[in-house]
């Protein structure tokens, strides 16, 4: 093999925080060779981003007191030899401008909102080649904008960031990084904020740029699927340390460290999927042919109605039909903007459909009143994505979980013992009853939300991306809980998610949504293994995990 | 990373915020207990002791530690009563405007799109109106009674609170816990009382604190111009205004109430800045 | 952009209409002017005749219409005391108010923006701390106290500057500085906060990763973004300037419109007062429209969408 372009030896990163010093990276050794892609994976707080930023001293924000201490050696070998740590500002700047490009997670905010795209890219060119004439710079900008696949380069360079989509913004950020022909790219979760089909395009773009220009790439991600797709070698980090390092195939097929094994096992879709929900329905209601729990017929919905709003809003939902049988776990999958959450809110009666008919538990959700309304609210419960805002910050967890019991007329004492029981059910220690939301972790908060939803003994649970905000290992435990509860209580569940892995693991049937329509539906295996419509095929093939599932 | 942070044990730190609050409480106490503390009747003239300098200057006496004005009234006593007047009017005016603002903000946030649009248009328009001119019109029309001042200040300051409350209500309505409560069948009343109001309280307290010095200065300014609190009632602004004619020979007639006013507004400013920093920390984290 | 500006213009029109209504109501609620014109009292017939002559017996809505047409024809009435046309009272004094206000605004922008920007960039330096400490003081102290302090120090203690009137250029120094200080403080404080906010944004990281020097980042990225919110604050400050000028004119006995206004309140000279209300409101509304226009032009996010 060639000599490395970049090498790190015994790198430590420490942050000063009000609570004391945090040792975020504890001795990393890594060589990055020309043309290869190394992925660093780990859960949040593993230190992977901290390490990536340390390479170019990006922890030090200009005009801000330095709170980061970096030790060890980071050496650049191509195109010039330099020790980056402890180097003077000029050398660091030269390395940033000419040698190593950086790609960030949130592309829109990584671009200056009041500057056009062209000048933002041109600035990078001029920094790398100070002698270049204006014409050369413009030519290079147009060249790279073309290469990253933005339409009509000559016009696009005059656009402002907010006029582009998230995926397009990420292309611009990549252009800024790649336009100076760096020897290495550092990509810090570059696709995490993107939809899966866009993610697939961006990964493809990075790959092709890398092939054409022979760049090395350091790719930071928490998504093992992406790693499998893109990386030659993988570094698994945990608590600031490297627990495993090896070629991707080897690590994935024969993980050495127990943590790597846990991580791989936590991946949604990695286990035997479908907790076989259908038979449970039969057990619960052996003989009676039950009416469907949810029936949405040709439902349309659009926002607005005010004088000004009407013209800019189209239909969020158009002729969407879904049917969910009692006892079934039904997945709704789609990208952002597909209308899946709107469908959830319609089923809860928070929105009124513009057209079509909805029947949930035998009621029309937005029109149910009086005693029927109370019964409906007991029977249909919901769990949200963001557990941080789903709990009132001023109420103890126990009080929050008891809210449904209070509303439906239980005495405080009864509710207390009931909530203890519920906390048991969702595996939360009773000590947490008196805690406040900010005092516990995201996974624990989500458990409280589940307890609150289960308190009224609902028949139907609508879960809107309930594990999206969680780390994979936590995600796996929450999904396990869902599966168990579903099996024990015979719940019907509508599981809204953008993650096909999660859907595959939990759902017996699935509906695929795209631009407000249900484009495909059926048993999960059929839909995911043998998609019939174009969109479903794109979606399934975009899923990184497919590469090695 | 682990986000289970342990809250440190509560103890009162001697930081700027605590000191400022203590100082302010002290001044408020001076105003509240002015009748007990004041060494002289604030309106009693003493022609033998006219324009006496403060105690630390040559010719000053311990009987009049802030000195006396041009007709021999004790400036210290007048300052104490002036604090009382200024705080009284500002507090009442602020309460009045807060009630008005919160009511309109709640109406706007919970009353449906058309009510919201109407209330917000009124609010927008009110923000562009020249406050001081409206005050002057109101005073010219209704006279310079203290209650007129309270009323006018209340009528003019409500829009900031209405905006805040509306914004908070709209934000809180979209919070997961409010929706979850709706999904559990919680009534509007329950949601408003249990989930919205408690979370509204602290930003409201902060903005009221932040706007208090502005209200106080509004009264002081009007009195300074001679169209606010009328003599013989002691008012800090009026004292400064009246003392203008004697700046050359007896600067303290304007100077002492000026120092009192500056102290009060600086303390409020310190508290406001500290509160703002803490809120920023809260919103960042 | 058109949509945004048309909404703002509509709002400005509504505001002015509301001001006219308030001015009208104030004028009519204040009673008939005859008490002033005939302090010795008049007979009932005489009063009825006068009311008929001035149209005060007609329905309110009709009176309001007459009032509006009068105003649009530039007929604002006369002072109840001097019988001078109201607009002339203001026209004679407005130049002084505008000159002092304009100079103060200029001073505030020239000092406030760099002060705030530098204080943000070098926030831990002693100079920045000192500057912001001064800004803190300036922000908390009302105009009339600043004015009196400056008079005492420069006028009576050092005896270097005149303290009343506007006879010579030196006379302008203290009033302009007094009016400018709170505005400098407000602009500097806001500018500092806006800069710090911009520094925290991710596009600064991008700029760093391009290899830009700190100076280029400050000028090209931080400052440019911080200036946009500052525009709206300037609008508020200009409105505040009008309020402040009333106090400054009182402190320094300037021949501006402030004195006219205060006198008209004390003497319940309603025609004069209502003109002041309308004129001030018009200035504020126009300034706000101008500011909105600047804001839209400066921020592509509004210019291209709103």
Image: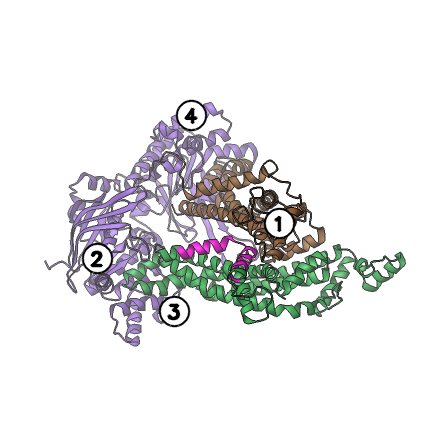
Taking the magenta stretch, the answer to whether it contains residue C270 is: no
> In this rendering, is residue A510 above or below A207?
above
The first of marks 3 and 2 along the sequence is 3
Foreground: disc 1 or disc 4: 1
What segment is highlighted magenta in the picture?
A: C130-154
- In the drawing, what numbered circle is on residue A158? 3
Q: Please tell me in which quadrant of the rendered image residue C54 appears.
A: bottom right
The colour applied to the residues of chain A in this rendering is purple
> For the residues marked 2 and 4, what is the alpha-carbon distance in whole angstroms?
54 Å
Crowdedness near tag 2: few (<14), some (14–19) or many (≥20) residues, C-alpha within 10 Å: many
Name the residue carrying label 4.
Answer: A418
* Towards the viewer: A532 or B217: B217
Percent position of residue B51, x then y: 61, 50
Q: As drawn, which residue projects farthest toward the left?
A: A1
Name the residue carrying label 2.
Answer: A217
> For the residues marked 4 and 3, what is the alpha-carbon distance in whole angstroms?
62 Å
């Amino acid at each position: 093999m060639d000599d490395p372009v970049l090498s790190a030896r015994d790198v430590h990163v420490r942050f000063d925080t009000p609570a004391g010093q945090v040792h975020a990276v504890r001795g990393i050794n890594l060589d990055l060779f020309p043309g290869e892609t190394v992925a660093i994976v780990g859960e949040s707080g593993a230190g992977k981003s901290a390490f990536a930023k340390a390479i170019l001293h990006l922890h030090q924000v200009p005009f801000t007191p330095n709170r980061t201490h970096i030790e060890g050696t980071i050496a650049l070998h191509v195109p010039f030899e330099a020790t980056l740590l402890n180097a003077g500002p000029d050398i660091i700047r030269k390395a940033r401008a000419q040698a190593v490009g950086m790609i960030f997670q949130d592309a829109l905010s990584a671009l200056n909102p009041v500057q056009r795209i062209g000048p933002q890219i041109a600035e990078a060119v001029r920094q790398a080649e100070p002698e270049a004439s204006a014409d050369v710079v413009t030519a290079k900008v147009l060249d790279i904008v073309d290469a990253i696949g933005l339409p009509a380069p000559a016009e696009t360079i005059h656009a402002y960031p907010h006029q582009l989509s998230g995926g397009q913004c990420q292309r611009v950020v990549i252009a800024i990084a790649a336009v100076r022909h760096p020897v290495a790219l550092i990509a810090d979760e570059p696709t995490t904020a993107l939809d899966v089909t866009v993610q697939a395009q961006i990964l493809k773009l990075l790959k092709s740029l890398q092939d054409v220009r022979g760049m090395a790439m350091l790719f930071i991600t928490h998504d093992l699927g992406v790693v499998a797709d893109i990386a030659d070698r993988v570094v698994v980090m945990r608590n600031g340390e490297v627990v495993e390092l090896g070629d991707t195939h080897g690590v994935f097929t024969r993980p050495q460290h127990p943590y790597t094994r846990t991580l791989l096992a936590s991946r949604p879709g990695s286990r035997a999927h479908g907790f076989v929900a259908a038979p449970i329905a039969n057990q619960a209601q052996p003989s009676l042919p039950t009416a469907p729990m949810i029936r949405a017929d040709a439902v349309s919905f659009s926002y607005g109605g005010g004088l000004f709003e009407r013209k800019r809003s189209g239909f969020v939902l158009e002729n969407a039909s879904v049917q969910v049988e009692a006892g079934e776990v039904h997945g709704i999958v789609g990208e952002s903007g597909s209308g899946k959450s709107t469908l959830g809110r319609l089923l809860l009666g928070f929105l009124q459909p513009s057209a079509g008919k909805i029947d949930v538990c035998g009621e029309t959700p937005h029109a149910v009143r009086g005693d029927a309304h109370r019964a409906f609210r007991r029977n249909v419960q919901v769990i949200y994505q963001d557990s941080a805002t789903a709990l009132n910050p001023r109420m103890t967890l126990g009080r929050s979980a008891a809210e449904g019991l209070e509303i439906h007329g239980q005495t405080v004492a009864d509710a207390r013992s009931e909530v203890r029981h519920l906390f048991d059910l969702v595996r939360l220690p009773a000590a947490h009853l008196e805690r406040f939301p900010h005092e516990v972790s995201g996974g624990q908060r989500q458990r409280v939300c589940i307890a609150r939803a289960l308190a009224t003994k609902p028949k139907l649970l609508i879960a809107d991306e309930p594990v999206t905000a969680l780390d994979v290992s936590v995600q796996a435990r929450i999904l396990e809980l869902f599966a168990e509860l579903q099996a024990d209580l015979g719940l019907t569940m509508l599981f809204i998610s953008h993650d096909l892995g999660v859907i595959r693991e939990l759902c017996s049937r699935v509906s695929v949504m795209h631009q407000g329509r249900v484009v495909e539906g059926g048993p999960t295996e059929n839909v995911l293994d043998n998609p019939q419509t174009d969109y479903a095929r794109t979606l399934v093939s975009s899923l990184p995990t497919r590469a090695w599932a | 990373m682990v986000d289970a942070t342990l809250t440190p044990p509560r103890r009162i730190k001697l930081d700027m915020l605590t000191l400022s609050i203590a100082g302010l409480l002290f001044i408020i106490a001076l105003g509240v207990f002015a009748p007990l503390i004041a060494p002289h009747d604030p309106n009693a003239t003493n022609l033998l002791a006219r324009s006496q300098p403060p105690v630390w200057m040559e010719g000053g006496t311990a009987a009049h530690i802030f000195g006396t004005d041009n007709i021999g009234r004790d400036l210290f006593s007048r300052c104490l009563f002036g604090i009382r007047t200024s705080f009284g009017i500002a507090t009442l005016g602020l309460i009045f405007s807060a009630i008005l603002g919160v009511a309109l903000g709640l109406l706007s946030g919970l009353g449906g799109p058309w009510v919201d649009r109407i209330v917000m248009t009124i609010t927008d328009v009110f923000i562009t109106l020249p406050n001081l001119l409206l005050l002057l019109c109101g005073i010219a029309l209704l006279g310079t009674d203290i209650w007129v001042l309270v009323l006018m200040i209340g009528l003019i300051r409500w829009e900031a609170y209405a905006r805040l409350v509306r914004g908070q209500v709209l934000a809180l309505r979209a919070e997961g816990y409010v929706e979850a409560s709706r999904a559990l069948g919680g009534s509007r009343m329950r949601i408003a009382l249990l989930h919205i109001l408690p979370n509204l309280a602290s930003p409201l307290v902060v903005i009221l604190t932040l706007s208090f010095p502005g209200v106080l200065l509004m009264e002081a300014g009007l009195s300074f111009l001679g169209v606010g609190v009328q003599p013989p009632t002691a008012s800090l602004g009026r004292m400064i205004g009246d003392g203008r004619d004697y700046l050359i020979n007896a600067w303290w007639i304007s100077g002492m109430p000026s120092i009192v006013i500056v102290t009060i507004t600086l303390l409020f400013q310190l508290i406001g800045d500290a509160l703002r920093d803490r809120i920023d920390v809260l919103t960042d984290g | 952009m058109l949509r945004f500006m048309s909404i703002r213009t509509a709002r400005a029109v509504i505001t002015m209409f509301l001001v006219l209504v308030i001015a009208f109501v104030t004028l009519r609620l204040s009673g008939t002017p005859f008490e002033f014109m005939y302090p010795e009292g008049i007979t009932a017939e005489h009063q009825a005749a006068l009311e008929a002559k001035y149209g005060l017996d007609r329905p309110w809505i009709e009176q309001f219409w007459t009032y509006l047409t009068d105003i649009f024809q530039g007929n604002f009435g006369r002072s109840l005391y001097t019988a001078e046309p109201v607009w002339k009272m203001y026209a004679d004094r407005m130049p002084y108010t505008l000159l002092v206000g304009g100079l103060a605004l200029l001073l505030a922008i020239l000092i406030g923006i760099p002060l705030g920007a530098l204080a943000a960039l070098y926030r831990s330096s002693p100079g920045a701390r000192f500057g912001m400490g001064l800004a803190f003081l300036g922000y908390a102290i009302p105009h009339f106290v600043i004015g009196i302090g400056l008079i005492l120090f420069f006028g009576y203690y050092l005896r270097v500057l005149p303290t009343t009137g506007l006879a010579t250029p030196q006379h302008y120094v203290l009033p302009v500085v007094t009016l400018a200080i709170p505005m400098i403080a407000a602009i500097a404080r806001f500018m500092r906060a806006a800069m710090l906010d911009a520094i925290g944004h991710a596009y600064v990281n991008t700029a760093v990763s391009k290899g830009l020097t700190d100076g280029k980042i400050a000028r090209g990225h931080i400052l440019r973004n911080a200036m946009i919110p500052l525009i709206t604050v300037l609008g508020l400050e200009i409105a505040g300037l009008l309020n402040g000028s009333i106090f400054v004119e009182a402190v320094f006995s300037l021949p501006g419109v402030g004195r006219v206004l205060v006198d008209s309140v004390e003497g319940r000279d309603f025609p004069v007062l209502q003109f002041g209300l309308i004129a001030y409101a018009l200035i504020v509304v126009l300034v706000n429209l101008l500011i909105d226009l600047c804001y839209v032009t400066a921020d592509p996010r509004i210019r291209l969408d709103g």
